[in-house]
Image: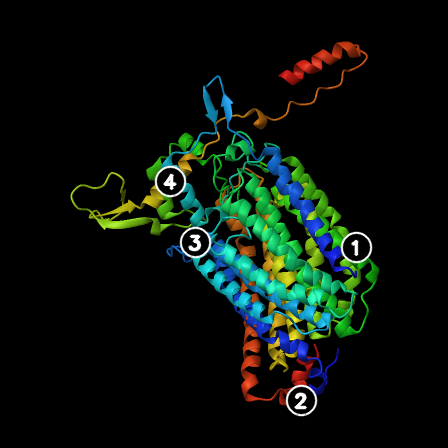
Amino acid sequence: MTTTSSTAIEPEASGIDASTRVPLLLLLGSAILWLVAGGVLALIASIQLHAPQFLSRCPFCTYGHVQAAQETALVYGWGINAGLALSLWLLARLGGAPLRAAGLATIGAGFWNLALSVGLVGIFAGDMTGFAFLQLPAYVQPIMLAAYAAIAVAGVLAWTGRRTAFTFATQWYAVAPLFIFPWVFSVAQVLLLFAPVHGTLQAVVAGWFGQNLGALVLVPFALAAAYYLLPKISGQPVHHYDYTSHAFWVLLFIGGWAGGRHLIGGPVPAWVVTTGIVTSVLLLFHYVVVAVNLAGVFAGRRRTALRFVAVGLLAYLLGGVLDAVTSSRDVAEVTQFTFFSAAQTQLLLQGAVTFMFFGALYYFIPRLAGKPWPSAGLICANFGAALLGLVLNVGGLFVAGWVQGHDLNQAGVGFAAIAAHTRPWLLAATAGQALFLLGSLALAANFARLLCVCAKQRAAELLSPPATLEATVS
Amino acid sequence: MKSSPLFFLGLFAALAFSLTALVLGTNAQYGRLAPYVDETQGAAFPQQSPGLAARGHLVYQDLGCAACHTQQVRRADFGSDHARGWGERQSVARDYVFQDRVLLGDARIGPDLTNFGGRAANAGLDASRILAFLHNGQGEMPPYPFLFEVRRVVGQRSPKALTLSGQSDYELMPTPRAEALAAYLLSLKTDYDYPEAKPPAPAAKPPEAPAKPPAAAAPAAKEDEKK
């Protein structure tokens, strides 16, 4: 879509967008703040990997605390807030009707972020659960479940109240996490925290939850945006759209099984691991279809939003292939318990999900707020710094993990030697985290300026300079 | 897709599919796994940790130690766990039946701790050495000075206190959290071989026909399996 003047924006920023403005700006503002906070925490955790003394005298800043806090801030703060905002906006837009229960969504967003803030304080105080991707203290999790449900109601109403019976792939991917997250989150809370299952069953349940959170909540949010932006911006159809529903249902039905691959060699039933391996390979079908469907983003990468989506898509596809490869027992013998696994997680969260979210934000925030991005330069800075940061961070962790895995498999190599061998690559990863944080700060500054400009300058005045048009065109 | 009920039914079925198998299925399979009763020793294994060690497990959890250490030993032919001396046998589900919060860990920035207590006993490390290690750190292991209190010696030195080099008037007193953590680490032992932890017997070699008739080879194979 090409926007050349304010008149092109205003018809889109209609009653539908106006109905979503308050809850979505609250969700997005919170998301961007959490992105920056999570980036700072990720940088600290990354430094502690090669400088263990860093902040070690602070009882709140052990590596375990900081690592859990950064993961929580990025997943629950950035990922869920931004994902919900995208989902509500897309469902309202494609439903063709103003958002209903927007007030409930606003209250839910407020409670979600309040509970998350309390949860982060709890993590630093040592109240974390110890389960990956479910580190929030038990006392805030029920509140967060209720808050999420309150926000999701608006999305489900937008789905059920749509003007046309026919639905698009964007709507499937946008509405599915609204239903899935409350289910898996509540099951995990009950079976891990309030009436915990015995023994290593906890690891199975935690693996199931983590896999669902990534593959069936965060990824669908991101794919919903990608399936919307490609035809909307480039004007091209989604190639082989007939197969899109197959890819969707394959992801839904078997995506939740793949968590077992992380438990290779562990004290759990062998069939859990085997099904994890098999489904990781079967999911390649989903990745192939998504690649074919969205290949057009590479042709349209000169558009700002599609450039971000293209990077996110590449990261997503690479991550899918790596999941299948590393689920092989021979490869896992090297990569398991190493930084390689951390790199895969970063590739999904920082690469695939975050870049697709970035692309979507650059497209829809101007429409939501009714004015363009104040600075095209900050958008370029965000893209450049985030891309370079991603490459350095993920690349550094991949190499460090591979070196670490080979060293670990040689019993004669001590941990001091392993640390020395991995240090250069971990330093590269730290540089990557710092650059990624700079990119996030550029987004935050641009967003803050956009909100502040509101009171001082009319939107139409800002749309006229060509430099800002470049950003708005996305 | 046009039908909302059908769509949501599909979502429900998709989640129920993995939930039923992975969560409910595994729960039915070994959710009630009990300790193993060894009649020859007249005891059940694993044995529950004493109170101080149980409290130490909570300290281990709230410090986030599992971010760097695993507690799962893989089988001897998978990785170097066995060669590094982290355990004589692979970990099995029964090892964890008394743990309220199972922290298997997914990173080995430091060594596996499944059998730390067993290794410490072999190396002659006692609680005071563990406490000194926690205070000072070593290599990639950060120090945890906030688990200790520096205090002036009044009267006799506390038997629990560590010595501060160069400061004879002061002593380093471990907090209850430090003592509990040390007790927990020393309690980590997998010194009992469960039947399921024993590696499967190697498959019997096929008879080198025609030296023996098949009927004679079969009992020999069964004998091998018993061994």
Mark 3 element type: loop
Q: Quadrant of the C terminus of chain A?
A: bottom right
- Numbered label attached to residue B182: 4
Which is nearer the eye, A329 or B169? A329
- Numbered label attached to residue A246: 1
Examine the image and state in which quarter residue A233 appears.
bottom right
Q: Mark 3 and 4 residues: CB-CB less than 8 Å, in contact?
A: no
Name the residue: 43% across, 49% down.
B62
Say which chain tag 3 marks. A
Discs 2/3, front: 2
Disc 3 crowd rating (10 Å Cα; few below 14, some 14-19, many 20+) is many
- Asked if labels 2 and 4 share a chain, the reply is no
Work out how far the residue at label 1 is from the one at label 4, CA to CA, in angstroms: 54 Å
How far across and how far down the image is residue A159, in percent? 70, 65
The three-letter amino acid code for the residue at tag 4 is Ala
Q: Mark 2 and 1 residues: CB-CB less than 8 Å, in contact?
A: no
Q: Earlier in the sequence, mark 2 or mark 1?
A: 1
- Label 2 sits on residue: A464
Res B168 visible? yes
The three-letter amino acid code for the residue at tag 1 is His
- Asked if labels 2 and 1 share a chain, the reply is yes
Discs 1/4, front: 1
The three-letter amino acid code for the residue at tag 2 is Ser
